[in-house]
Image: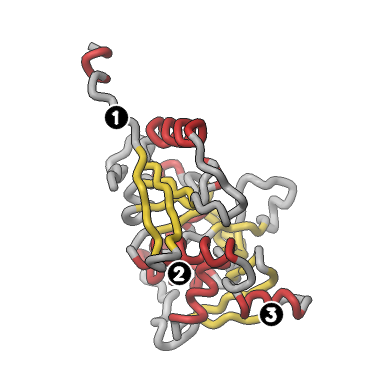
Amino acid sequence: MEHEDRSSSSSGYSSSSQWIENGKHPTLVGWSDKFFFLFFEKKRMQNEDTTTTLEERKIILHFTSMKSVLVYDPQDCYDLYTKFKLLNRSIGSLPNFITQNIFHSLPMSIPIEFAKWASLHSTHISIHNSSQHASEWNSFLQYPNNSKQEQIRYAVFTDLYQKGYYISSGDRFGVDFIIYHDDPLLYHACGMVYICNTEYQNRKIDSKLLCSLGRLATTVNKTFQLAYWNDTTQSVQYVSWKFYQPFHKTILN
């Protein structure tokens, strides 16, 4: 997949960012709150010991519902980003600015797919049941076997994650996932992933959908990926879709 380096971008996220610190709830105001971990880099430069190794502690995830798994500790958010390549999304409000919803703070919300993967494959992450309904926790324990749709989405997520991609929600682009080839601080997203199984939300792939998402991906300089769970091979398969413009430069000139 193609990826674009923005380490030398003229936008300059470092110079345009500001820090708002409210006790133990720091927030990066500026480019995106998913780069919450910059707080710890700043603290390190000030020679302040704010971190411990994963061997000395566990990352705690709080399960509240099938749509909400939260992280309250900023150190855990940092470790999830740097050690597990997980992009978090802050959803809490700032104590001193509760009437706005542009800038956010703790807690951070993480995908249910990662929470399940961590419960099965990581000894450094602990999941606490904070749900008020026993049925929700039972659904999580059974996930992704509650439905075929869950199985397909979980399979695609884990396949992309195990390939080493940073994964974010694709809601902004009308797809399921946005993937980053490397650290999102340095690179733009390289791909838009759309699950095309008919068992997944009764989806049907037609020419209009391919054209619209393909054109969108080309416009935002990303590769459009169709992801498909193959029951025969028991694996996820992908088809890349990108418009070819052989005469583009000639026409412009």
Against 150, is 132 above or below? below
Against 4, is 71 above or below? below
- Residue at figure coordinates x 32%, y 38% from the top left: 9
**Where does the image place residue 22, in percent across and percent down from the top left?**
61, 61
Against 39, is 178 above or below? above
- Marks 2/1: CA–CA distance: 38 Å
- Residue at figure coordinates x 47%, y 65% from the top left: 155
Mark found first going from the N terminus, 2 or 1: 2
Closer to the camera, 225 or 63?
225
Q: Secondary structure at mark 1?
A: loop
Left/right of residue 22 with respect to residue 88 in the rendered view: right
Closer to the camera, 206 or 223?
206
Left/right of residue 146 with respect to residue 152 in the rendered view: right
Please name the residue that numbered disc 1 is placed on. Answer: 244
Neighbours of disc 2 within 10 Å: few (<14), some (14-19), many (20+): some
Which circle marks residue 80 in the picture? Answer: 2
For the C terminus, the image quarter is: top left
Please name the residue that numbered disc 3 is placed on. Answer: 138
- Residue at figure coordinates x 78%, y 76% from the top left: 132
Closer to the camera, 87 or 75?
87
